[in-house]
Image: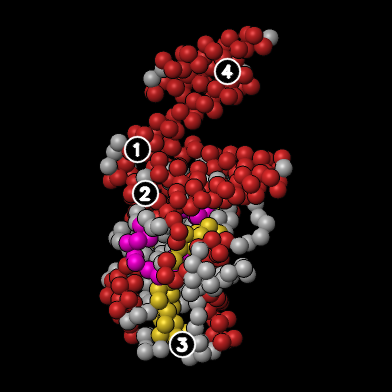
């Protein structure tokens, strides 16, 4: 077919498409593709898919978060924004989340632009984009833009705080044995090198009472305690901790609070300002679905000049939050594409996202918990857990359950063996459907019955 014919068909299909109802769009494209060939309709199909995703997002926002959580048709359409594998069911989104196509495309666009003239486009063009991005993150986080530094992950953000906070020999910090290993190792290294002391607490998980954890922190606190290290969502199990209450209690005693929010930011519906914490670090490549290797650090303004940067700068005791972004040469493409991830997140809505994630967690947890050999290791109450959930099967090691799920059913999960926990962690995301979870539930029950 000559090009003029293809163009005519494309124009005709585009016109007809605009006249079609939502209920007939999919069948229309199946017929159109078979009639004219996929090659000539690639751009039209892409445009139509984008329109369908946009309309699904608009429809979701017309529903209350509770009603939206259970609308499978809308979530299935919205899920087309992702490019996840059709052959592997990914239920380990808690480690690193996939990016929607719009974010992937933004990374590619910025990366190719950088390569046209790196020192010009990177340092003169894209570097200037950090300030509007900072404001965009601040708006999402509910804090002042001058209190936010953009970095690569939670480890870097909290490492900046751990190493940049002035402590002396004999000073004490309180943290749990369920905090993230990188944070534990950092504080242990300061303990070895500088003689500070870690006062450990080991909560019995799951916890469904705020006072239980609050009492553990206060009981481990002495007149020498300077820092409480707080994990908002414990990565091993999915336990949500009462960070706002813990920060309020710490303030009464003049204790600095550091919040590890790697798993909660853009997962739970909150603002950083709700906590009134001193320091806050998170990864944006988890629940925000931003590019891999993107993160954020926040601290109260008076603490900026008192906190030393992780990498050397000309004025390490300045009150400019930007001193914490001195990384040398790095790719600006992932950083700048954070903006597209925020737009996509906002299109869903924080509350709707949280409600959907909790809905999915309840869906599979309630189904497998009916089996006598299966035990849940997480609360089902929304104030104590959301997307992340953990389970075990009597008489089996978690690593073996996870291996069976993948080898026999092509379901990707992660096993956890840490302290008293020996379980499989399941983390669906907004692109996960209940149909996916039905297949997962069936696989778990088959393994338990074997």
Q: Which of pointers 3 and 4 indicates the residue nearer the eye?
A: 3
Q: Check residue 274 for magenta coloring.
A: yes
Cα gap from disc 2 to disc 1, whole angstroms: 12 Å
Front residue of 326 and 332: 326
Tell me where residue 311 appears, x and y as whole percent: 62, 68
In this figure, what is the number of numbered marks?
A: 4
Evaluate if marks 1 and 4 touch, with contact meaning CB atoms under 8 Å apart. Answer: no
Q: Which residue is mark 1?
A: 60
Q: Any mark on residue 171, and which?
A: 3
Q: Which residue is mark 2?
A: 350
| Relative horizontal placement of residue 352, taking residue 398 as reference (left or right) | left
Q: Earlier in the sequence, mark 4 or mark 2?
A: 4
Q: Position of residue 374 (x, y in %)?
A: 40, 63
The tag earlier along the polypeptide, 3 or 4, is 4
Dots 2, 1 in contact, CB < 8 A: no
Q: Which mark is residue 117?
A: none
**Neighbour tally class for label 1: few under 14, some 14-19, many 20 plus, Cα within 10 Å:** many
**Mark pair 2, 3: CA separation:** 39 Å
Per the model, the C-alpha gap separating discs 4 and 2 is 40 Å
Residue 120: percent from the left, percent from the top?
69, 45
Is residue 229 shown to the viewer in this render?
Answer: yes
Q: Is residue 30 left or right of residue 258?
A: right
Relative placement, left or right, of 23 versus 43 is left
Please state the extent of the stretch shown in magenta in the rendering: 271-287
Residue on which disc 4 sits: 34
Residue 402 percent across, percent down from the top left: 53, 60
Tell me the element at label 2: helix
Image depth: mark 3 or mark 1 in front: 3
Sequence-earlier tag: 2 or 1: 1
Q: For the point 42% across and 20% down, which residue is it?
A: 24
Of pointers 3 and 1, the one earlier in the residue sequence:
1
């Amino acid at each position: 077919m000559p090009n003029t014919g293809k163009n005519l068909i494309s124009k005709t299909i585009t016109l007809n498409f605009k006249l079609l109802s939502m209920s007939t769009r999919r069948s229309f494209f199946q017929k159109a593709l078979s009639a004219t060939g996929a090659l000539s309709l690639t751009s039209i199909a892409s445009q139509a898919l984008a329109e369908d995703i946009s309309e699904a997002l608009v429809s979701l926002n017309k529903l209350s978060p509770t009603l939206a959580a259970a609308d499978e048709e809308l979530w299935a359409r919205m899920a087309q924004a992702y490019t996840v594998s059709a052959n592997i069911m990914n239920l380990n989104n808690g480690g690193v989340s996939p990016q929607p196509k719009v974010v992937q495309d933004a990374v590619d666009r910025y990366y190719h632009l950088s390569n046209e003239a790196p020192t010009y486009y990177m340092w003169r063009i894209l570097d200037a984009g950090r300030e509007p991005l900072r404001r965009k993150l601040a708006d999402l986080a509910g804090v002042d833009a001058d209190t936010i530094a953009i970095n690569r992950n939670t480890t870097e953000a909290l490492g900046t705080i751990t190493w940049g906070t002035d402590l002396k020999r004999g000073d004490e910090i309180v943290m749990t044995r369920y905090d993230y290993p990188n944070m534990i190792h950092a504080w242990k290294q300061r303990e070895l090198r500088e003689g500070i002391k870690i006062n450990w607490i080991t909560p019995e998980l799951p916890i469904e009472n705020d006072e239980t954890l609050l009492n553990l922190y206060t009981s481990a606190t002495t007149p020498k305690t300077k820092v409480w290290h707080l994990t908002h969502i414990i990565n091993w199990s999915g336990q949500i901790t009462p960070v706002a209450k813990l920060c309020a209690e710490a303030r009464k005693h003049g204790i600095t609070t550091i919040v590890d929010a790697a798993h909660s930011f853009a997962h739970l519906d909150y603002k950083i300002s709700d906590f009134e914490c001193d320091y806050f670090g998170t990864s944006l490549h988890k629940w925000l679905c931003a590019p891999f290797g993107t993160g954020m650090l926040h601290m109260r303004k008076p603490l900026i000049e008192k906190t030393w940067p992780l990498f050397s700068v000309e004025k390490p005791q300045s009150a400019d939050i930007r001193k914490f972004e001195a990384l040398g040469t790095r790719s600006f493409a992932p950083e700048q594409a954070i903006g597209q991830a925020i737009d996509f997140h906002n299109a869903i809505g924080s509350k709707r996202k949280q409600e959907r994630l909790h809905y999915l967690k309840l869906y599979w947890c309630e189904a497998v918990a009916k089996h006598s050999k299966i035990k849940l290791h997480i609360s089902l109450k929304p104030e104590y857990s959301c997307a992340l959930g953990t389970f075990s099967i009597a008489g089996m090691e978690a690593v073996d359950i996870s291996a069976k799920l993948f080898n026999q059913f092509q379901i990707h999960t992660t096993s956890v063996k840490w302290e008293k926990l020996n379980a499989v962690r399941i983390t669906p995301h907004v692109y996960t459907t209940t149909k996916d979870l039905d297949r997962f539930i069936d696989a778990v029950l088959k393994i338990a019955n074997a």
